[in-house]
Image (spheres, helix red, strand yellow):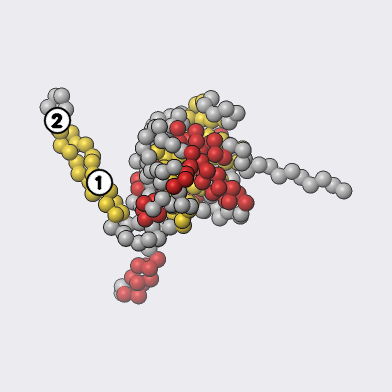
Amino acid sequence: MAKSKKKDPPVILITNDDGVSAPGIFNLVEAVKDLGKIIVVAPDKPQSGMGHAITIGNPLRLHPVHLFEGIEAWQCSGTPVDCVKLAVDKILHRKPDLCLSGINHGANHSINVIYSGTMSAAVEAAIESIPSVGFSLLDYSVEADFSAARKYVRIIVENLLKNPLDKHLILNVNFPAVPDSLIKGMRICRQAYAKYEEDFLERNDPTGKKYYWLTGKFVNFDKGRDTDVWALEHNYVSVVPVQFDLTNYVLKDKLQKTWKL
């Protein structure tokens, strides 16, 4: 009787926007390192708030780094989206089975998903037909405790690998900044309507020239109990399925009925 062919382990691409040496990406690698062949391609410096920016008009550089024991890793001079593109084209020479981005230092719930380099890397992967997940912890400190996040990262990735994956799947996962003992579980949520009420402080530099420093406070306008903000405020891990198709289908149908075209 012929022996069945051993299935190759899944290839998992890991990236982030905080930089290849950030604690969050080390914790992400640690959570999944035995679930497949791990390849790390991440920015060589922090790229928070870059959104879906790509590098045009400047050279991109890739350098191998030896930061993760037994795992191939590269640092890229570009944005998180650049990292995904280069990883697929120049390092893997194929599409990975899954792309994981994070674990971000700081929230990426609600409107943050628009600005987030972490989530844009995940979105770029899905555009390239690679299922993806972006992970974020609501703690900006480099000394943040990622132990609970690691636990839930592993649960989510194991579930995804066991079930057939939609090639355009994108999940935005946020972890409350509390010990594992206080986390009540996971909730599948919608994105809350919440945003930053921004203010630019006007100051003078040492030469007397004006400059502006962005500040503001986060305001939640959405009181729904099915949102990511509500879940996180009540110590749940929030899981929001997102998509790169920005079409408003309800408005599209309305305009087709009401506009005389």
Residue that carries the numbered disc 1 in the rendered image: 217
- Tell me residue 26's x, y (percent): 49, 33
Which label number is shown at residue 165?
none
Residues under labels 2 and 1: Cα distance? 23 Å
Q: Mark 2 vs mark 1: which is more N-terminal?
A: 2
Q: What amino acid is labelled 1 in the image? A: Lys
Q: Label 2 amino acid? A: Asn
Q: Residue at x 48, y 52 (%)?
A: 185
Q: Please identify the quarter of the rendering in which residue 211 is found.
A: top left
* Residue 252 vertical placement versus 238 (above, below): below
Q: Are marks 2 and 1 in contact (CB under 8 Å)?
A: no
Q: Residue at x 37, y 55 (%)?
A: 230
Q: Quadrant of residue 22?
A: top left
Q: Residue at position x 43%, y 57% from top?
A: 189
Residue 112 image position (x, y, % from top left): 35, 48
Front position in the image: 185 or 63 = 185
Residue at which label 2 appears? 204
> Is residue 159 something one can see in this rendering?
yes
In the rendered view, does 16 fall on the left or right side of 89? left
